Image (spheres, rainbow, N blue to C red):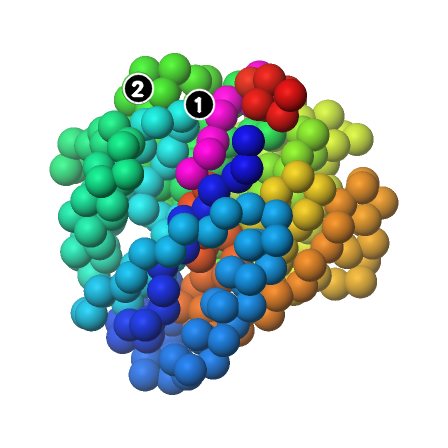
C-alpha cells in the first residue's frame, strides 16, 4: 500500500502571534515566497516515496499549514485536535470537514481536554503503541479516551522544555522500532519509560543542538528520513542504522516553531503489530 500524506498549501502562512518560544521576535518576519519554495521542495521530495494530498490554506489561519496538528489518524478513524490556544482553534472545523469529506470517522474530545493531534500523539513503528506527549499543549487526560477509541496502548511522556512544546519536536519513532529522540526534553520518569519500551540498540539519542534545529521533527517513510537539519554525527548515526537521510531546509517554518513533521500528516497509519501485514 502506498503511503499517503496530507499537506496544506502555505498560501496564508505567516507569523502573526506568539504561542511558542520560536515565534518570539518573528512576527511579520516570515518570507512567504521562500516558505512556498521550501514547502514545495519538501512536498516534491516526499512525493517520490508517498502520495502527497494537498489542501488549500485559509486566510487568517496561518498555522493551518502544520497539518500534523489536525488530529491523529489510525485506520479510518481521526481523533480531531482540541487546540489549547485560541489562535489555532479556528483550524478545527476546516480539518474536520476535510476528514469527513475523505471518509474518516471523526472523533471529538471534550472541549476542556486539550489535544494537538499527531504533534503530540505518535505511533510506534514496531509496537502496537501510541506515544503521547503532554505538559505543554496536550493534556494527559486524553490518554484513556485515545486508548479506548483507537484500541491501542498509550504511553504518556511529560515534556519539560518549552522549546519542545510538541512531542514531534523532540521524538521520532522510526521504521523497524528505532527511535530518534532528545532525552533532555523529558522528565526522568518519562525517560525511564522510553528506555523500558525501546531497547538500547534501537535508540538514537539526539543532543540539544540537533534537537533545536528540529532534527527530530522528521518524516520517516520506509528507510527514508526527511528533516530540516542533521549534524554530520547524527546523519552518520542514522545511516549506520540503515536510513537514507534527506535534508530539506525549512527555515521559514522554523520561525513559527515547525519543520518537516509539523508540515505533514500521515493518513495511512496502522498499529505497530500490523506493520508487517501492511507491508506484505
Residue appearing at x 60%, y 17% in the figure:
277
Q: Is residue 271 magenta?
A: yes
Residue bearing the label numbered 2: 149
Q: At x 49% / y 68%, what residue is drawn?
A: 40
First to last magenta residue range: 267-273
Report the Cα–Cα distance between label 2 and label 1. 11 Å
Residue 242: x percent and y percent? 80, 41
Q: Nearer the viewer, residue 163 or 11?
A: 11
- In the image, residue 178 sits, relative to residue 145, either above or below, namely below
Task: Say above or below: 221 vs 169.
Answer: above
- Name the residue that disc number 1 marks: 154
Rendering quarter of residue 275: top right
Q: Quadrant of the C terminus?
A: top right
Q: Residues within 10 Å of mark 2 (few under 14, many from 20)?
A: few
Instruction: Check the picture and name the quadrant holding the N terminus.
Output: top right
Instruction: Say which quarter of the image contains residue 180.
Output: top right
Q: Residue at x 56, y 18 (%)?
A: 274
Residue 136 percent coordinates (x, y): 36, 48
Amino acid at each position: 500500500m502506498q503511503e499517503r500524506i496530507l499537506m496544506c498549501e502555505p498560501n496564508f502562512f505567516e507569523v502573526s502571534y506568539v504561542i511558542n518560544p520560536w515565534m518570539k521576535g518573528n512576527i511579520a518576519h516570515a518570507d512567504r515566497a521562500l516558505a512556498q519554495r521550501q514547502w514545495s521542495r519538501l512536498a516534491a521530495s516526499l512525493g517520490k516515496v508517498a502520495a502527497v494530498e494537498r489542501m488549500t490554506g485559509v486566510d487568517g489561519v496561518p498555522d493551518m499549514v502544520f497539518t500534523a496538528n489536525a488530529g491523529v489518524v489510525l485506520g479510518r478513524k481521526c481523533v480531531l485536535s482540541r487546540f489549547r490556544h485560541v489562535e489555532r482553534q479556528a483550524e478545527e472545523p476546516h480539518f474536520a470537514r476535510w476528514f469527513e469529506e475523505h471518509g474518516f470517522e471523526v472523533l471529538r474530545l471534550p472541549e476542556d481536554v486539550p489535544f494537538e493531534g499527531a504533534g503530540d500523539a505518535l505511533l510506534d513503528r514496531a509496537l502496537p503503541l501510541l506515544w503521547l506527549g503532554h505538559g505543554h499543549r496536550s493534556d494527559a487526560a486524553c490518554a484513556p479516551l485515545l486508548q479506548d477509541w483507537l484500541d491501542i496502548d498509550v504511553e504518556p511522556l511529560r515534556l519539560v522544555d518549552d522549546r519542545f512544546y510538541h512531542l514531534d519536536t523532540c521524538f521520532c519513532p522510526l521504521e523497524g522500532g528505532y527511535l530518534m529522540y532528545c532525552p533532555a526534553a523529558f522528565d526522568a520518569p518519562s525517560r525511564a519509560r522510553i528506555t523500558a519500551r525501546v531497547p538500547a540498540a534501537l535508540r538514537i539519542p539526539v543532543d540539544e543542538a540537533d534537537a533545536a534545529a528540529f532534527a527530530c521533527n522528521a518524516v520517516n517513510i520506509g528507510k527514508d528520513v526527511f528533516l530540516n537539519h542533521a549534524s554530520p554525527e547524527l546523519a552518520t548515526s542514522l545511516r549506520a542504522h540503515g536510513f537514507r537521510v534527506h535534508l530539506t531546509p525549512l527555515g521559514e517554518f522554523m520561525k513559527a516553531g515547525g519543520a518537516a513533521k509539523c508540515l505533514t500528516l500521515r493518513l495511512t497509519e496502522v498499529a505497530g503489530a500490523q506493520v508487517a501485514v501492511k507491508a506484505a
